[in-house]
Amino acid sequence: MATPNRNNKRPSSPNAKRTQPGGKPPRKFTPKPKATTPKRESDDIRLNKYLSNSGVCSRRDADIYIQSGNVRVNGEPVTEMGYKVKPTDTVTFDGNLITPEKKEYVLLNKPKNFTTSADEDASLRNVLELIRGASKSALKPIGRMDKNTTGLLLFTNDTDLIRKFTAPNQKSPKIYQITLDRNLKYEDLESTSSGVLIDGHRIAVDEISYIENEPKSEVGLKLRTSNVKVVRAIFEKMGYNVLKIDRVMFAGLTKKNLPRGNWRYLTEQEIINLRMM
């Protein structure tokens, strides 16, 4: 049997300790065990919010439907207020399966010859064409715009927000730039600033003014309603023909960096601001 050569180095095994220059062994690395994340309680969602997120109704109306027994979870009717739904639960409303949608918000700078109504003129194109591809959800415009009205139009699948901004008593400011067929008389401007009576309802006007460096037929109007028909009615009542209405501000949102015919998603902060109004 051959005697091993003592000068030959033994091959190192994979588990053999190595030393750094200077003879000090390296620090032993012990991998930290991966933490297992428990299921968060926030994964569950209150049933009324689940219904609201699905676009079926507002959260307030959802409470009524729940109490009435219209909602079933996994085949069982649920009438308990505050009941929480798990992501794996099956929820039906009046026998129809519903699923919550992610809330989405799209701001459009509407051009002319597009309408929000399918009934206005069959030959006109609908504004939904302009935001095609923005969302897989069925987005709806907040308020209406006829073919001649341009400017900011907000789309969302947030039914609570739609109800909020279309309610008669909502308080968010809107600014319109109006082009009239002739110069607005100063006395008409002054009388409008104190409010206008339209169809028996008092319309409060926050501000009205001539547009700087423009003819007196160009007028800026700030008020709370999102109903463009009211804007038109204010001036038609005084005998003016409205040639153009452009909404330049809607509830704090502006047309900055948004060319005509283009759209963009709202930022998280903008969404928060709208909910706080």
Image (spheres, helix red, strand yellow):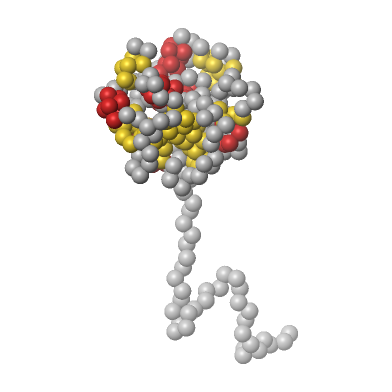
Identify the residue at image location x=56%, y=73%.
16
Q: Look at the image and tell me in which quarter the C terminus lies.
A: top left
Residue 13 makes an appearance in the image: yes
Task: Determine the image quadrant of residue 60.
Answer: top left
Compared with residue 67, is residue 273 higher up or lower down, i.e. above or below? below
User: Whole-percent x and y of residue 221?
Assistant: 35, 32
Seen from the viewer's position, the closer of residues 255 and 233 is 233
Seen from the viewer's position, the closer of residues 194 and 78 is 194
Seen from the viewer's position, the closer of residues 247 and 170 is 247
Compared with residue 230, is residue 23 higher up or lower down, i.e. above or below? below
Q: Look at the image and tell me in which quarter the N terminus lies.
A: bottom right
Tally the marks.
Answer: 0
Identify the residue at image location x=54%, y=40%.
261
User: Whole-percent x and y of residue 93?
Assistant: 54, 16
User: Whole-percent x and y of residue 162?
Assistant: 45, 25
Identify the residue at image location x=47%, y=83%.
21
User: Whole-percent x and y of residue 171?
Assistant: 33, 26
Compared with residue 85, is residue 80 higher up or lower down, i.e. above or below? above
Identify the residue at image location x=31%, y=35%.
209
Residue 41 makes an appearance in the image: no
